[in-house]
Image: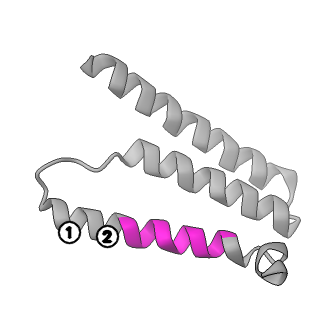
Amino acid sequence: MHELFTSGHAIDLVIAILALEVLVVRGLMQRRRALPWPTLVAGLCLLLAWRSAQAGAHWVWIALSLSAAGMAHAVDLWRRWSEA
């Protein structure tokens, strides 16, 4: 279990589960409602930033991932605020 987390494969597993979740939910919803794309993108970008940091990627990739997560979160907040 220690190796799973220290190698970064746990994050890879979570990203794969997130992708599977999107496919399953989209299939179950039958296009009745839109998926919360900004929320999913924000979460995915945070996971990518975490994975990049753990892999020792250049700080620019981490900053880009975090910036994309912040923008997706801002879009999500704006959409929720305008619906209320």
Determine if the magenta segment contains residue 40: no
What residue is at 49 percent from the left and 72 percent from the top? Answer: 17
Q: Position of residue 9 (x, y in %)?
A: 71, 78
Residue 75 vertical placement versus 5 (above, below): above
Determine if the magenta segment contains residue 19: yes
Magenta residue span: 11-21
Q: Are marks 2 and 1 in contact (CB under 8 Å)?
A: yes
Furthest-front residue in this view: 1
Q: Position of residue 49 (x, y in %)?
A: 71, 54
Q: Is residue 76 left or right of residue 44?
A: left
User: Which residue is denoted by mark 2 in the rendering?
Assistant: 23
Q: Amino acid at mark 1?
A: Gly
Residue 28 vertical placement versus 47 (above, below): below
Q: Amino acid at mark 2?
A: Leu
User: Under tag 1, what secondary structure?
Assistant: helix
User: Which residue is denoted by mark 1 in the rendering?
Assistant: 27
